[in-house]
Image (spheres, rainbow, N blue to C red):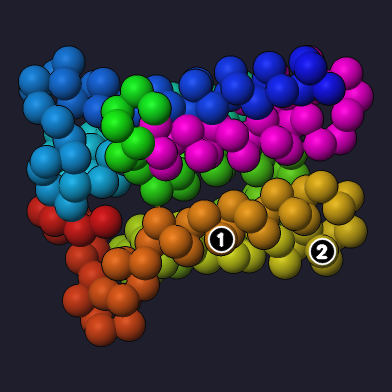
Amino acid sequence: MLYTIIAIVISYLLGSVSFSIVIAKAVKGIDIRQHGSGNAGATNTLRVLGKGPSIAVLALDIGKGILAVWLGRWLGDGNDWAPVLAGLAAIVGHNWPVWFRFKGGKGIATTIGVMASIAFLPALIAGIIAILSIVFTRFVSLGSLLFVCLTPVFVVILDRPAPLLWASLIICAFAIVRHRSNIVKLVKGTENKLGAKKGM
């Protein structure tokens, strides 16, 4: 139990490393949260800094989700909940980072890393649908919401263990809360598409 708690704490601190903020500061000397949409994530990094920094942010944010899950597996000693809780802690850290006054991103890239590590097939199927929706609509927020909402559905369909279902449902709730403004814009038809200067 002690090692599981340690894994959760380390995963939160790891998740709190907001790479969009770090890279924007290093590349342009700016706080990414004061530019574009104000979100500390890969999509806003793309709009403000371009493709290179955005790809780096995306890869690093996914990577910290994967690392958190594996840390939970390593320290959890066979406990099914340890990697799940460590993954959730990384997402919480990304959304509410202790290093950056608890103002972080929306957690989708880190969620991808976590879900791909604990429920690969459900996440893969949901991810393909999400990517297709982004390709056809150019709404990244819609694709993100489809991913987190469909993953629990496929967890159930594919009969995955209960911890994975609970994790996917909690992650879905996180994402909906963090995308409240995007949901309103989607409903109103005012959401910016990928390639616009401002948006998600």
170 relative position to 51: left or right: right
Looking at the picture, how far across and down is residue 62, in whole percent? 50, 32
Task: Report the amino acid beneath label 1.
Answer: Ala
Q: Is residue 76 above or below residue 139?
A: above
Instruction: Please state, as top left, top right, bottom left or bottom right, where the N terminus lies in the image.
Output: top right
Residue that label 2 marks: 156
On screen, residue 173 above or below 3: below
Q: Which residues are magenta?
A: 68-97
Mark 1 burial class by Cα count in 10 Å: few <14, some 14-19, many 20+: some
Instruction: State the residue at coordinates (72%, 43%).
Output: 120
For image coordinates 11% across by 53% down, the residue present is: 197
Label 2, secondary structure: give it: helix
Residue 2: % across, % down: 79, 17
In depth, the one of 87 and 58 nearer the eye is 87
Mark 2 residue type: Val
Q: In the rendered view, does 193 fall on the left or right side of 116?
A: left
Residue of label 1: 173
